[in-house]
Amino acid sequence: MSYSTSGRIALNNQREAKISRFRTWVLLAVPLAAIFFQVYVPQFFHYLSYLELPLLVVVYFALMRRSQIHGLLIGALVGLAQDSLLGTKNPLGMFGIVKTLVGYFAASVSVRFDVDNALVRLFLAFFFFVFHQFFYWVMARALLGQQLGFDLQQTLLIGLLNALVGVSLFHFLDKLRETA
Amino acid sequence: METFLNRYRNLTVLLLVIFAQLVLLAVQVKNDQDVRMIRIWTVTAVTPAARVVEWLRGGSIGFVRDYITLHDTHDQNRRLQAEVDRLKLENIFLKNELNTADRAKALGVFQEHTPSKTLAANVIGLGAGANAKVVFVDRGSVSGVQRGMAVVTPDGIVGKVTAAYPTASEVQLITDSDFAAGVISQKNQVRGTLKGQGSPVCKVDYVPLGDKVAVGDWFYTSGDDRIFPRGFPVGIVKSVRDGQPFQEIYLEPSFLQRGLEDVLIITEGVHQAIPDQAVANQPVYIAPPPPGADQPSAQPTPGTEADKLRAEYKAMGEAQKHTYGEGPPGTKPPDFTKMGVPGNVPQAATPSGPGSSPSPPAQIAPQPAGAVPPVKPPQAKPPVTGSAPPPSTASSNPSTTAPLVGQPPPQPAGAKPLSVKPAPSKPVPPDTPVADRPRE
């Protein structure tokens, strides 16, 4: 396990924040695999459609890169790709905007917290999932006039499940980091 | 300004990216136009991988099934042997179902028999969202798929192509809340508009309150929408209730019954008639006739009581060299008093007994469909009075019928014989037994 053993959650200063680097193929393949998973796997296991792997991947890369610009760009690209596969009746940009914000804020948080800590990761994955779902709901109502339902209890529950999966996924993705 | 931008570089980039996407969104919403290029990139990037994984999945499942799990075969065989007896009876019916349950075969048969030109496709992915009601299929514009084409299965309609990419197409399912199609009920030809609800149940809208639609009715495509050709099954009505100003009819799409893996894209639609019969889940298998069934049977077929009685009368007439229906009125009838006496009735009068004469007891001439084969009463019978019933050919008790005919009651002097006019025959199905037919 490469989790932080110091027990600290907040960093004393920004110099303590280590920037993780990834190979280019990892930056391309992992988001693509996450999108592919969401398109392909739920046709065999429908309950897995609640798993927002693209969001978790955006959160992870934004946290680990600790760069707001990198975070928001990854978020925008993954979001637009997800929009593209949502069906032509859904205009491009909805997931794009939401995931852009998630990427930006996740990167902003990462410079203040020890994102190698499992508890911090769990909380951040949960928080950004709820933020993602809520902000998408707000935008769908405000920009598109869609009357979508927002079940807070269900969102919190699915957010918790996503967070648990996210911690395991982050641990796996840690192995793909470039070693200095 | 430059210093300001440098200082707030991250925020500036964020605002720019958000702004760009908002503009993208606004352009699409305002012009109702899709930004096709981005979608093509994404679909082209994702669907080949889906195709490869699907191929690997199919191959690996076959490998695991055929080779890896062979160590279970012995136990499986023993278990299956024990189940064979129980399954034998069930198997007669299930064999037919299992045969046709083979999707590819069913799809091929359907493709062969439907007059529309179709293109087989596999579902390779779902829409990227928990509530998405779209699927992606592995046929695209390269294969001739175009936007707006109908997608069906042998069970019923599935949806329509909403976007055709080079190697894949996006299909909007009929359960999508934005889906609509013209439908017509099978029973009373009630027209309506099928609407998706975002759930596994669809609604048939715009059906006036007076129109008769009942639970269990089938709906078919009406062809009015110019997408689906007329005559494809849509679903079965699950609930009907009065609403304002139209009826609220909910139906279960028939394509959901067996899942969705293989579909047909209709490239050239041909309208069909709405079938009269309800759609059966499976075609019924009719076994070939037993050997020699097409040849006439050498054994006399057991007849009804009426047939036996008729044969007795006929044999009695032949024994006394009397031909029924000949001779002027007043001709002496055969002596029917000997009917009950043993030895006087020829063997031919007992057609159904074992070892009986091969002479058929009641030869009914072939009749045109729907006509009743006339069972002729003896025409040379003595005149009967109005109080005496005519001899009934359907009577099951010869001992009471024979004396009545053979011994006419004393006729009063000067009484005219009544002519018995046969009632007009009603059409009866030709396979109805003689005893069940209306009496003449």
Image: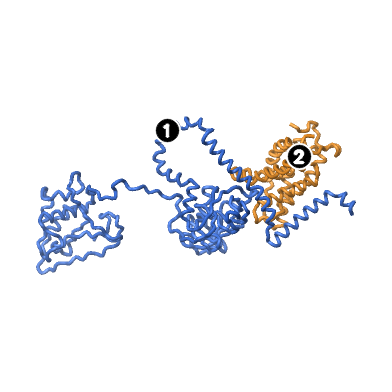
Chain colours: A orange, B blue
Label 1: few (<14), some (14–19) or many (≥20) C-alpha neighbours in 10 Å? few
Instruction: Find residue A31 and report its horizontal and vertical position in percent.
Output: 70, 44
Labelled pair 2, 1 in contact (Cβ < 8 Å): no
**Left of B187 or right of it: where is A47?**
right
For the residue pair B44 and A30, the one nearer the viewer reads as B44
- State the residue at coordinates (75%, 54%): B21
- Label 1 sits on residue: B81
Of tags 2 and 1, the one toward the viewer is 2
Quarter placement of the C terminus of chain A: top right
Instruction: Find residue B163 and report its horizontal and vertical position in percent.
Output: 62, 56
- Residue type, mark 1 in image: Gln
- Label 2 sits on residue: A22
Which chain is disc 1 placed on?
B
- Residue type, mark 2 in image: Phe
- State the residue at coordinates (50%, 54%): B236
Q: Are marks 2 and 1 on the same chain?
A: no
Q: What element does badge 2 sit on?
A: loop
Q: Residue furthest front?
A: B142
